Image (tube, helix red, strand yellow):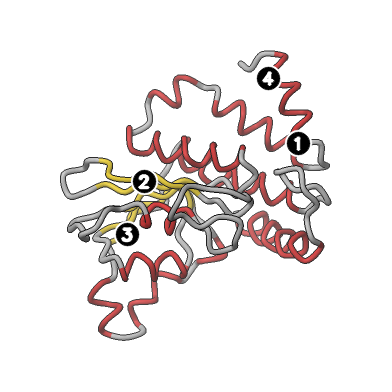
Amino acid sequence: MKSSAERAKWSDRFPWGAGPSLVRASAAMWSSAMMYAELDPVWAQAVDQSWESFRAGSIGIGAVVTDGSGTVVAVGRNRAGEDSGPAGRLYGTRMAHAEVDVLSAVAAPRREGLTVWSTLQPCAFCAAAMVLMKVSHVRFAARDPLWDGVERLPELNPFVASRWPGRTGPESGEVAVFGGLLPLAWCCASSAPTHPSGASTPSRTRHCWRTRLRCWTTVT
């Protein structure tokens, strides 16, 4: 369990309406040593990245790339809500998705047999990035209802079909719950005038995330 000091820190950092209950739920899940210890080591790193993303004020999504032998070659996360980041990584833009972030960290030349592990189902943008990078397989922990049907992109043409990675997901158990919970908590936070980073959230952004929140809560 978190100490009173840690709980107070969370209360100070997230003073908005519906957000704290979900934040407390995610914090409670994160504090479960048994759950974390039982995670696949690669999923554990992806979860670490998603938590770091959420705490930095971005959407809580993390990603890992492994090579053909299963060795981790890069880790990354969503950086959309941040005003700084590592060299060569996108940040502070809607394009700063976790999968794009982690693929940008894969050293050239391109490696064969890459697998992307993401805590949330990749969107069309990230799926296209994987096609360009010749990713062999993608695994995702939680379903994202906004991108149901993205698996039909290979129907576009033979080129996309020839490079389309195999897909495994959503997962089951704690990693799936956690993978879906953090973005949902961010949705609640972003529907309030205060952004998770402490800055003012534009009304257009709040409307966008309220729409996403309705979609998630309707179909999940």
Circle 1 or circle 3, nearest the eye: 1
Check disc 2 and report the residue beneath it.
64
Q: How many marks?
A: 4
Query: Disc 3 or 4, which lies upstream in sequence?
Result: 4
Query: Disc 4 or 2, which lies upstream in sequence?
Result: 4
Residue visible at 64% across and 48% down in the picture = 184
Distance of label 4 from label 2 (alpha carbons): 28 Å
From this viewpoint, which residue is outermost toward the front? 87
Give the amino acid at mark 4. Glu
Distance of label 1 from label 3 (alpha carbons): 35 Å
Q: Secondary structure at mark 4?
A: helix
Check disc 1 and report the residue beneath it.
14
Query: Disc 1 or 2, which lies upstream in sequence?
Result: 1
Distance of label 4 from label 1 (alpha carbons): 12 Å
Query: Marks 2 and 1: in contact by CB < 8 Å?
Result: no
Q: Position of residue 2 (x, y in %)?
A: 63, 17
Residue toward you, 73 or 84: 84
Give the amino acid at mark 2. Val
Q: Which label was assigned to residue 167?
A: 3
Query: Disc 4 or 1, which lies upstream in sequence?
Result: 4
Left or right of residue 214, residue 45 in this image:
left
Q: Quadrant of the N terminus?
A: top right
Query: Disc 2 or 3, which lies upstream in sequence?
Result: 2
Q: Secondary structure at mark 3?
A: strand
Q: Position of residue 91 (x, y in %)?
A: 55, 55
Q: How many other residues sit within 10 Å of disc 3, few (<14), some (14-19) or many (≥20)?
A: some
Q: Which label was assigned to residue 6?
A: 4
Residue visible at 45% across and 26% down in the picture = 35
Circle 3 or circle 4, nearest the eye: 4
Q: Secondary structure at mark 1?
A: loop
